[in-house]
Image (cartoon, rainbow, N blue to C red):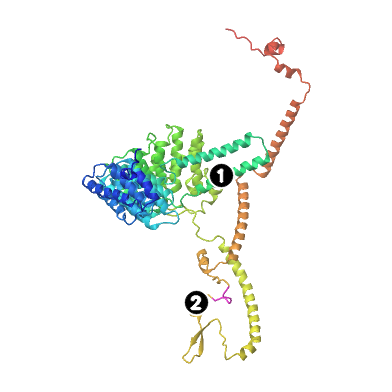
Amino acid sequence: MAKKKNKAIFLPTNIPKLQNLIKRDPESYKEDFFIQWRHYEAMRDILTENVEQKNENFLNIIIFISQMCTYYPKETKNFPNDIATLLLNFQNNLNNETKEKIIQALILLKNKNVISSNYLLKVIFPILLSSNTKSLHMRIFKAILSEIKNANLKSYNNKINKMGKTILLEIIQKSKEEESSLGIWAVKLCQKLWKLKLWNDAFTVEIMKEAVLHSNIEVIIGGVHFFLNVDSFSFDNSDDDIEDSYQRDINALNHKLSVNKKSKKREREILKTINIKKKKNKKKEEKLHSFTAIQLLQDPQGFAEKLFSKYFSKKNINLILKHKLLLLQLLSKLIGIHKLNVLGIYTFLLKYLNPNQKDVTQFIDCAAHACHDLVPPDEIEPIIEKIANEFINDAVASEIVSVGLNGIRSICSKQPLAIKKELLQNLSEYKKSKHKSVMIAARSLIGLYREIAPEFLKKKDRRKFNTIFTSKKEPLRFGEELDVQKDIKGIEFLKECIKENESNIDNYNDKNDRKNNSKKQENKETIDTNSEKWIDFNNDTIINKTENNTYNSTKIELTEYINNDQEIPKNSSQKTVINEKTNNVFDLHTSTILTPLDFFKLNGFKTQQCILMKNDQNSLKRKFTKHTDNESKEKYCKKEDDKKKIARRMKRAKTNHSTTNEKKSRKKNFMMLIHKKSIQKKKKPKTNK
């Protein structure tokens, strides 16, 4: 009989079997574990001398120890520090496979709570710069993402988030100096965490601001995409697939309703499921951010000036038109949202405003976004003139003319003073164009100026009522905002109401005084009995305590602090009295305190005013009609008579009745009637040649 082989002989080489046995009984296999531990220490010292060399046994032992660390915690105290120092000290020289295995071992240690997530992130973040392979980059990227997600599951972990942001900022700054493209991973990470609503604050926006001013073009475009479409931009197409599946489900349910046998019960069930799915989709859509990234910028004016000086003022920078357009879109949105002044952009845009230019509509859109109320109109005027000269001509196609008119309208909606009166009146003549797109664009431009500034248009282009009320309306001025409420409407009406009620208030106060005096006389007896305990004071008295604990009352003289014209009302709860001298509306605002009852009266006055305005408009319409009432009545009667005659003829045509020979001859062929004398007489006589 052959003897059984001893298992202990194969344990040093068979690591998976040893791992399984230690899990079952760690104390009995303690010596075997220490053999592997010594083996690890020896190979670690060898690897420090030859860093570039790859050793598979060493990599297997690292993972084995990281899994067995929890069973022997005292003996393996320094294991995570040893691995981390090896990785950080030799990060540029180590083999890529050894780096991946060490990172894998560190993640295992973190999952078993041997090391903290803070410690892991400090080790992993710097390796993003040193690593060369894409697979290692993706491994580190996914590990960092999962760690930050797990840290912020229960509550916002400020410690880890702050540390991560500072490291990412350092990574972008280092890659900026070295002109490397490794900063793109920091940009991707920021964008992913912003989308998950974990890093949606001003610090992340500052990191992306540094990315836009980077030296590498990949990092620049990543930063620009972050600011332009941070909600819609995604690295994966997972969100698009979810939306498509949602639409397919609803379409399938609607198809069931139309095809299957109809019953009320089935309709209810299908409609219920559609409503539930719609509610779920609404919850997903509510994840949009309240503030965009551009709004959270700390110094937008400085950032806009740096952008323009770096990418648009110098000729040395070689940028493709696509990248230049993206940067222009960012700059124009910055100027439009924060109302900044970067005057060089308007002269820069002039050379791209040609009908033959590629993506010319996007350049016009940039010009419209860059305009606002606080830009001087002299700066925007050459852009409008250039568009009018290049796009709006008889030699150009109708599509180009409509693009030019729409572009001018979008610019003028931001700054209406940028266009001249003569040019606007010339452009308004395109409302009679044969082409529909040109006609609609011209009418929309006229409609814009009817509301904002009707004095810029001709009299025929204004509305009937605008021509009357233009004299009352104040002209537009540079820097003034439109539709600003300067006063409370109908406050003058209140002045008359208050004066009427003043006499009633005085009478009411006199009655109250009489009642109060009668009550005081009744209560005198009770006060006299307790005169030693209680002392009566008026409302206008101040109590002063003397040294002998006696109280002296001194009356306040308020007449010193009030003008001679004003008087204090008897009831302090009533509103202040209006002076007779106040004529301006501004004085009424300062001298009165309006109560909710006053605002109720104002609303009633507004409704009355609206009714009067409608009546005035109807009277104006009557004035504008060319004919008198009698002539219009006559015309109306004639039209009705004509309609009645036509209706009678139609009825006769429908009924079956005999016709005359003349009517029948009209339907006959000409050759059948040519022999008749009446037709032969009509023939022209032959001319002599």
Tell me which segment is drawn in magenta. 567-573
Tag 1's secondary structure? helix
Q: Count all numbered tags in the image, as a single digit.
A: 2
- Contact between marks 1 and 2 (CB within 8 A): the answer is no
Percent coordinates x, y for residue 463 in the rendering: 54, 46
Q: Residue furthest top?
A: 689
- Tell me the kind of residue under disc 2: Ile
Count residues near mark 2 (Cα–Cα under 10 Å), then give few for <14, some for 14-19, many for 20+.
Answer: few
Count residues near mark 1 (Cα–Cα under 10 Å), then give few for <14, some for 14-19, many for 20+.
Answer: some
**Residue 282 or 268: which is nearer the viewer?**
268
Tell me, yes or no, if residue 678 can be seen here.
Answer: yes
Query: Quarter holding the C terminus?
Result: top right
Percent coordinates x, y for residue 464 in the rendering: 56, 46
Q: Residue at x 47, y 49 (%)?
A: 288
Q: Which residue is mark 1?
A: 277
- Tell me the kind of residue under disc 1: Lys
On residue 496, which mark appears? none
Percent coordinates x, y for residue 231 in the rendering: 44, 46
**Mark toward the start of the polypeptide (1 vs 2):** 1
**Residue 169 or 442: which is nearer the viewer?**
169
Q: Which residue is mark 2?
A: 562
**Residue 351 or 542: which is nearer the viewer?**
542
In the image, 74: left or right of 295?
A: left
Q: Residue at x 56, y 45 (%)?
A: 278
In the image, 635: left or right of 312?
A: right
Percent coordinates x, y for residue 241 in the rendering: 48, 39
Reply yes or no: does residue 6 show up in magenta.
no
Q: Residue at x 39, y 35 (%)?
A: 355
